[in-house]
Image (cartoon, rainbow, N blue to C red):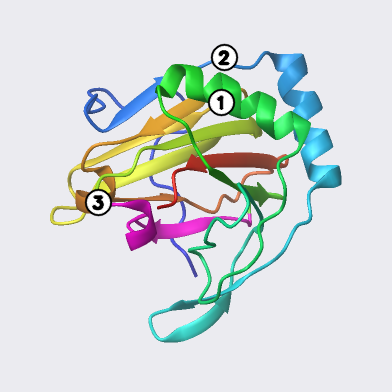
Amino acid sequence: MEQLSFFAEQGQSPGLPAELLEYHPGLFGERESEFLLQKLIRESPWQQRVVKMYDKEVITPRLTAWYADPETYDYTSLRRSKPNSWTLELLLIKDKVEAIAGLKFNSVLLNYYRDGNDSVAWHSDNEQALGTHPVIASVSFGQVRCFDIRKKQDHRQKYSIKLESGALMIMKGNLQADWEHRIAKSLRPMRPRLNLTFRVVM
């Protein structure tokens, strides 16, 4: 069973490394966030993927949907698959994110955490298709969940960010090379949450 969160569920860890993470709360207001949460949950073509972990195939404990510019490679699978076309809502979100990130993104991965049982295990987004120092912009809607990071070579170095609804977090620098991150399971009742991670796929 995946380890439950060991970080505080209120507030941010002190001393978050600015060269690795930017956190922008309130990019989307409460009403707008709730509207986008419900609409994207209702209309996205959700899939539950099978991935390989520790030489075993497992079903991901969350739902996903992949949107991108035409002919963009789906780096999360072993085959080239046609991405879903951008929706008006996703393009509007992308415009607001790009204005802050200072970067044009060509794809977004939607993750749907239905309740506290849905999670993502420790990992790094270090796929070759993302480049050596990818900038990944992450937008959250719905339930507040803790985003935990730890140093690969020293797990005592760790931080946690409380991802609030409507907030933007930008991952950059050596984060994917030297650190790993997760969204842990929770025993507490949890509302649905959506996470949109905007990326540049080479």
Q: Please tell me whether mark 1 sits on a helix, a strand or a loop.
A: loop
Q: Please tell me whether mark 2 sits on a helix, a strand or a loop.
A: loop
Q: Nearer the viewer, residue 32 or 75?
A: 75
Q: Which residue is mark 1?
A: 164
Residue lying at 32% horizontally and 44% vertically, measured from the top left: 134
Badge 1, how many Cα within 10 Å: few under 14, some, many 20+? many
Foreground mark, 2 or 3, reads 3
Q: CA distance from mark 2 to mark 3?
A: 30 Å
The quarter of the displayed image where residue 95 is located: top right
Badge 2, how many Cα within 10 Å: few under 14, some, many 20+? few
Residue 126 counted in the magenta span: yes
Tell me where residue 34 appears, x and y as whole percent: 77, 25
In the rendered image, the residue lying farthest to the bottom is: 55
Q: Which tag, 2 or 3, sits closer to the chain's start?
A: 2
Q: Is residue 47 visible?
A: yes
Contact, CB < 8 Å: mark 1 with mark 3?
Answer: no
Residue type highlighted by circle 1: Glu
Q: Which residue is mark 3?
A: 132
Q: Which residue is mark 2?
A: 26
Residue 188 counted in the magenta span: no
Q: Is residue 144 visible?
A: no
Tell me where residue 198 appears, x and y as whole percent: 51, 39
Magenta region: 117-131
Q: CA distance from mark 2 to mark 1?
A: 8 Å
Q: Please tell me whether mark 3 sits on a helix, a strand or a loop.
A: loop
Q: Which tag, 1 or 3, sits closer to the chain's start?
A: 3
Q: Is residue 186 above or below residue 21?
A: below
Contact, CB < 8 Å: mark 2 with mark 1?
Answer: yes
Residue lying at 26% horizontally and 23% vertically, measured from the top left: 14
